[in-house]
Image: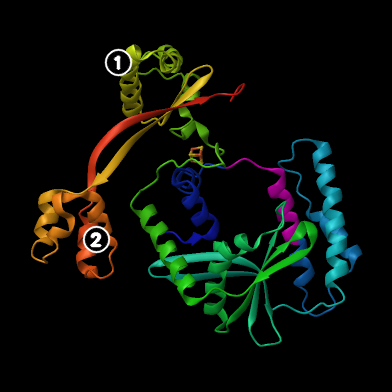
Amino acid sequence: MRALSYTQISLYQNCPLCYKLQYIDGLESKEKGYFSFGTTMHDCAEYFFKVKVPPPPSLEQMLDFYERKWLSEGYESAEEEAEYKAYGREMLTKFCEIHQPDFRMPIAVEHKFTIDIGNVKLTGRIDRVDKLDSGGLAVIDYKTNLELFTKEYLDNDLQLTLYQLAVEQSWFLPVERLTLYHFRSNTPVSCPPRKPARLEEARRLVLEVAEGIQAGNFPATESGRCPCDFPQYCPYYKHKFAPERGESDVLDEAAVPQSVERYVALQKEIKGLELELDELKQTIADYCQAQGLNRVFGKGHALTYKMVERGGYSEPEVRALLEPAGLWPRVLGFDQYKLRELIKDEAVASELRKKLTELKQVVSAKPQLWVRRLAGEE
Ligand code: SF4
């Protein structure tokens, strides 16, 4: 199993398919101006703090380094690049004003680590680690995000949690502070370190992600960040790209957009047409299933397809477990609501509740279609 970084874990959590396309299939994501900008600003902070002895570089040296390290890739226009460049200069000027007077040598800058979590290697690079007067350590991560971080964001930031794990393993000193440094406003936002239970939770999450990857579990999972850089490979978007690829399908390609529009029209008609609607739905669902698609596109609409499963329990299996424990009367008539309540009841032996939970199975599965109106091209 290859080593996992925070970026990979977070991408897998967001969309396992996108992770696979990028890190297993090796597709390159598009260059973006804000990524180039973030890289340059990180390089400058590293240059400032990575001196062998104080003092740190002067403002003039910093701005000279900034010019040399500037990356032009990914900006949408020369104007946009110029705006970012001027803004970066302002940010660095403020950065020097703040950090030159109280400069202290950090313990580490751009610290590379690889630690073991179970049989998984977690790897990464921490922007800065400081030693505090109390003897403990502070983890600092620079961010060029637009908005300042909220308390909730900070409390739930997985990257800081994983970095705390790595730092405590690297130096055997306690981490006493976790900081995200908001570069745009030159504001450090800090919180106390994670408690052992949170660290354990993060370890489990790393192991779960690694298990998912090893099991080849890569479902496409939509979020506000969609479409990513690889929509042509995604079951939610690839139908849009089929004509470009010159692919012909079982269902005549020209009929798909018509079917989608017909489906939407039928929805609006009177009840008597419901039968026809259902038939069309089934045709589209079969098509999606046969083609491995989660979405098909017409001209003005798209249909999202999913097989919706309903979970439940089989009566003989549950009865066989509950009767010997004298608990069968608690779910009399095999009432699924009462059964769920019993599973939650901490007075019932945990082993029995675990076994009952494991009995849960898919009792029905129905195809469902959701209509989405497309705005303009999209
Ligand atoms: S477009 Fe598809 S593959 Fe890309 S992130 Fe969204 S769901 Fe995942």
Above/below status of 268 relative to 7: above
Residue toward you, 313 or 299: 313
Asked if one can make out residue 310 in the rendered structure from this viewpoint, the answer is yes
Name the amino acid type tagged 2. Leu
Q: Is residue 210 left or right of residue 341?
A: right
265 horizontally vs 162: left or right: left
Give the magenta-colored segment's residue range. 29-43
Q: Give the x, y percent position of residue 30.
A: 62, 40
Is 35 colored magenta in this rendering?
yes
Residue 162's disc number: none
Q: Measuring 28% from the left and 41% from the top, which residue is drawn there?
A: 310
Residue furthest bottom in the image: 134
Answer with the quarter of the image where residue 124 lies: bottom right
Provide residue 185's location: percent of width, then percent of height: 79, 59
Q: Which residue is mark 1?
A: 275
Q: Residue at x 24, y 57 (%)?
A: 357
Front-most of residues 84 and 312: 312
Residue 141 falls inside the magenta stretch: no
Residue denoted by label 2: 342
Q: Position of residue 331 (x, y in %)?
A: 18, 55
**Category of crowding for the residue at label 1, using alpha-carbon neighbours closer than 10 angstroms: few (below 14), some (14–19), many (at least 20):** few
